[in-house]
Image (cartoon, rainbow, N blue to C red):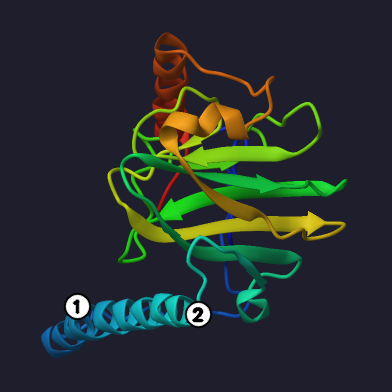
Amino acid sequence: MRQRSYDWGVERDARLAIERLDAAPVKPAPTVRQTDQALRALLGGFAARLSRTWLRYQKSVLERGLVNRLEMTDFGGAVPLQWYWQGLYQLEPDEALILETELPLRRRYWNVQLNDELWNAVEFVHRQSSLNGHQARVDSDGRFRAVIALEDPGVHNWLDPGDTRQGMLIGRWYDCDRWPTPTLTRVPLAQLRAHLPADTPLCSTAERAVALRARRLGAQLRRRW
């Protein structure tokens, strides 16, 4: 099961329990040997296997030339109704990447997040490294634009890569009437405003502090496993 949250800290998580309908036998306490085997499988097997899986996956994305370019995938149909857009981002400290996309008319849920080179989500409680459809500002022309930059560019839809100059970008369209593929445009940071609409929602230092505080509180009120 997967739960999504749009309005962090306001929406309530579902409370779920699973119970067997037939009479379940009392579960015996594990032996020392069973406990040892389970811990070794977890620490020596699962973690290494998962790390190899995602490192290989990112390598395949790199080999397909998806650097500052995005493609659609359904990750093998793992989540019904959901399509992903993915690619690697690369930028220098004096550059910015403009993420731009049309939006589906029906869009029950959508988001974008940044991962580092090891497939870890970039710190998202204290940094705005992700945005969803509730948090994002849509431009007056109906398109969504965000800016990936190492320093705050002063726009509302900033995606903070947390000092990582290269990583993975993942976006989701869930239960939408179509699945547009966004674009990434690499521009000099000093010329960023010339590449954005004149009415792009801006964000002052004080406004950013307020937004990040609300993000921290909302993240703490979410239940995360």
Q: Secondary structure at mark 1?
A: helix
State the image coordinates of residue 153 (x, y, percent, origin top left): 44, 28
- Please name whichever residue, 134 or 71, is drawn nearer the observer in this view of the structure: 71
Count of labels in the image: 2
Q: Quadrant of the C terminus?
A: bottom left
Please identify the quarter of the rendering in which residue 29 is found. bottom left
State the image coordinates of residue 115 (x, y, percent, origin top left): 40, 57
Mark 2 lies on residue: 24
Q: Are marks 1 and 2 in contact (CB under 8 Å)?
A: no
Furthest residue toward top: 206
In this rendering, the answer to whether 179 lies above or below 34 is above
The Cα–Cα distance between marks 1 and 2, rounded to whole angstroms, is 29 Å
- Please name whichever residue, 111 or 26, is drawn nearer the observer in this view of the structure: 111
Mark 1 lies on residue: 43
Please identify the quarter of the rendering in which residue 40 is found. bottom left
Mark 1: few/some/many CA within 10 Å (<14, 14-19, 20+): few
Q: Is residue 206 visible?
A: yes
State the image coordinates of residue 112 (x, y, percent, origin top left): 56, 49
Q: Amino acid at mark 1?
A: Leu
Q: Secondary structure at mark 2?
A: loop
State the image coordinates of residue 38 (x, y, percent, origin top left): 23, 83
Q: Amino acid at mark 2?
A: Ala
Q: Residue at x 52, y 71 (%)?
A: 66
| Disc on the earlier residue, 1 or 2 | 2
Mark 2: few/some/many CA within 10 Å (<14, 14-19, 20+): few
Left or right: 93 as drawn, with respect to 19: left
Q: Residue at x 46, y 13 (%)?
A: 204
- Please name whichever residue, 150 or 15, is drawn nearer the observer in this view of the structure: 150
Q: Quadrant of the N terminus?
A: bottom right
Q: Is residue 11 visible?
A: no
- Please name whichever residue, 213 or 97, is drawn nearer the observer in this view of the structure: 97
